[in-house]
Amino acid sequence: MSLGRGGALSTPFDVVTGAFSYTGRAIAARLLAGGREVLTLTRRPGLATPGLRSAPFSFDDPTALAASLEGAETFYNTYWVRFQHGEVTFARAAANTRLLLAAARQARVRRFVHISVTKASERSPLPYFRWKGVLERDVAASGLPFAIVRPTLIFGSEDILVNNIAWLLRHAPLFLVPGRGDYRVQPVSVEDTAALAVGAGDGETLDAAGPETYTFAELVRLVARAVGARARIVHAPPGLALRLGRLAGRLRGDVILTDEELTGLMRSLLVSHGPPTGRASFREWLDRSGETLGRRYVSELRRNYAHAAIADHDRPRGATSERAHLQEPARADRAVGGRQG
Ligand SMILES: NC(=O)c1ccc[n+]([C@@H]2O[C@H](COP(=O)([O-])OP(=O)(O)OC[C@H]3O[C@@H](n4cnc5c(N)ncnc54)[C@H](OP(=O)(O)O)[C@@H]3O)[C@@H](O)[C@H]2O)c1
């Protein structure tokens, strides 16, 4: 078994992408706490801890990628990109996801647990949700026993979105809520998301959605109260809120919110139609986290898009253009984040 820089694992073990990042970290922690050994695929290999080894994604070397998975039982896939920026596109992330699936099949991994998003649909006009729909179909058609977990908005430590709402509320005199703010979100904790992923049964597709649903305006007010922020919360036309959000992002050298994310939010795509599957209360988490939440700005670009090397590393071998290794979706995706960054 080849594990890149990670060293040998006793089998059986599970594979988790991104165990040093957000959702993958919670999944790995849950598996480790249950006595499992974990191999994580990551762009940042080498940060191994007891029971947890790492290997690079090796998208440029599918044979090495498959070899690194030999002996694995379950593959937990969190790999995705939040928005398109420069060379990092949904199309490429989808191609890479297919490489992960193919490697898992080649290595005879026993099952594949895929993290998607609520309301993923191949017919969505929003590229993020559309690509997620395409990949759900790919996972289901892979021939591997699979489960699909579709989170809403994931909250927890290391989160970016809620943290940066809190940061803005702490540091700006004004917080603009786009439109009426009556669109809904149903946040789910990162720990609940991990528990659902680890506990999902074969063939199951389920939403990861918490017990509380808030309008976006309510959510912003809750965050403001929890962190003791005095920013005035006012409603503004979505276009204006987005433009100011872009400006604030540019000042931070980041992308705070893309127009696609805002559209998804305003269409209440981050809620579930089914009963809640997560147990942790967003409100209670806020009460516990208010002291630290938003004290430090967390840059998505710095965390996930900073190094050109990362983008190059992500490119499948021989790929000359996005279309070269893609079958769908038919519509060209707009580089939402790229235009804004
Ligand atoms: N966060 C949410 O609120 C939320 C809501 C709904 C659905 N989801 C879905 O849940 C899954 C996990 O999301 P997450 O927020 O927990 O993500 P994350 O931990 O930041 O990243 C997940 C994985 O993708 C890799 N990755 C992230 N951005 C990348 C980039 N720009 N270029 C190359 N690789 C990148 C990370 O690599 P490294 O290991 O090297 O860091 C990691 O392995 C994703 O499929 C996401 O679509 C998230």
Image (cartoon, rainbow, N blue to C red):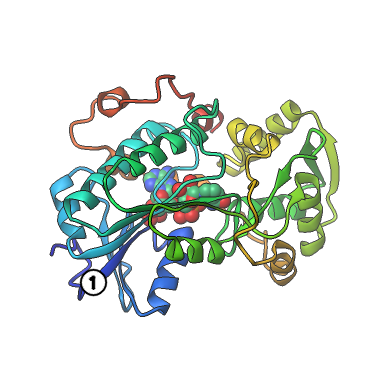
> From where the camera sits, is residue 302 visible?
no
- Which residue matches tag 1? 12
Left or right: 154, with 248 as reference point = left
Q: Is ligand 1 less than 8 Å from the beta carbon at label 1?
A: no
| Camera-side residue of 222 and 34 | 34
Vertical position of residue 7 compared to residue 200: above or below: below
Instruction: List the single residue furthest toward the top.
Output: 331
Q: Is residue 246 above or below residue 43?
A: above
Percent across and percent down for residue 337 are: 52, 33
Q: Which residue appears at 47% of the width and 66% of the height?
A: 26
**Residue 272, percent from left and from top:** 63, 47
- Percent coordinates x, y for residue 6 in the rendering: 23, 67
**Position in image of residue 328 (x %, y %):** 36, 25
Q: Along the line of sight, which residue is nearer the eye, 92 or 109?
A: 109
Rendering quarter of residue 18: bottom left
Q: In this picture, is 63 found above or below 88?
A: below
- Name above or below for residue 214 compared with residue 15: above
Circle 1: residue type: Pro
- In the displayed structure image, the side of residue 170 where residue 52 appears, left or right: left
SS for callout 1: loop
Residue at image x 23%, y 30%? Answer: 319
Q: Residues within 10 Å of mark 1 (few under 14, many from 20)?
A: few
Horizontal arrangement in the rendering, residue 206 relative to residue 65 (left or right): right
Whether residue 107 is visible: yes
Which residue shows up at 61% across the image and 42% down it?
Answer: 256
The quarter of the image holding the N terminus is bottom left
Q: Nearer the viewer, residue 252 or 291?
A: 291
